[in-house]
Image: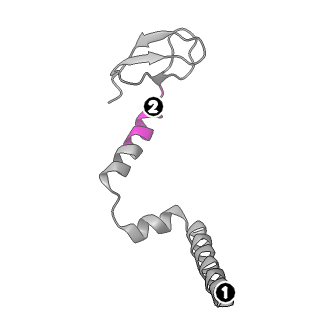
């Protein structure tokens, strides 16, 4: 009886590993195609990524800066730590 248990357990492991391998091989485009339109949460993440790619330069050193979290128009340079006001990012 214990032999059947190990056989069934082994088959389940093989099936689960097969599903994992298949999922890993699928590209993001295929996943999105199967899921249909992107949910609004994904659209928001994509919009945030595009906004964060905007080229806001530090007035002190000229390097690209990023908006500080929780603010509309405050920026902080990662290089020189200078904080300044700029265009609203949302």
Instruction: Give yes or no for residue 32 being in the magenta stretch.
Output: no
User: Which element is circle 1 on?
Assistant: helix
Instruction: Locate residue 9 relative to residue 31 in the image: left or right.
Output: right
The residue that label 2 is drawn on is: 54
Q: Position of residue 12 (x, y in %)?
A: 59, 80
Q: Quadrant of residue 78?
A: top right
Say which of 89 and 40 sits in front: 40
Q: Residue at x 67, y 83 (%)?
A: 6
The residue that label 1 is drawn on is: 2
Range of residues picked out in magenta: 47-56
Instruction: Locate residue 73 relative to residue 81 in the image: left or right.
Output: left
Say whether marks 1 and 2 touch (CB < 8 Å). Answer: no
Q: Position of residue 79 (x, y in %)?
A: 60, 16
User: Which element is circle 2 on?
Assistant: loop
Image height of 90 relative to 40, above or below: above
Q: Residue at x 43, y 64 (%)?
A: 32
Image height of 18 relative to 76, above or below: below
Q: Position of residue 60 (x, y in %)?
A: 54, 8
State the separation of the CA atoms marked 1 and 2. Answer: 63 Å
Label ID, residue 68: none
Q: Quadrant of residue 47?
A: top left
**Callout 1 crowding tier (Cα within 10 Å): few <14, some 14–19, many ≥20:** few
Q: Quadrant of residue 63?
A: top right
**Callout 2 crowding tier (Cα within 10 Å): few <14, some 14–19, many ≥20:** few
């Amino acid at each position: 009886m214990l032999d059947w248990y190990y056989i069934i357990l082994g088959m389940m492991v093989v099936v689960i590993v097969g599903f994992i391998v298949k999922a890993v091989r699928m590209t993001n485009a295929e996943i999105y195609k199967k899921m249909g339109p992107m949910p609004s949460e994904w659209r928001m993440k994509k919009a945030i990524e595009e906004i964060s790619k905007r080229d806001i330069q530090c007035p002190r050193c000229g390097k690209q800066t990023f908006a500080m979290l929780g603010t509309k128009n405050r920026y902080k340079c990662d290089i020189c730590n200078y904080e300044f006001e700029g265009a609203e990012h949302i």
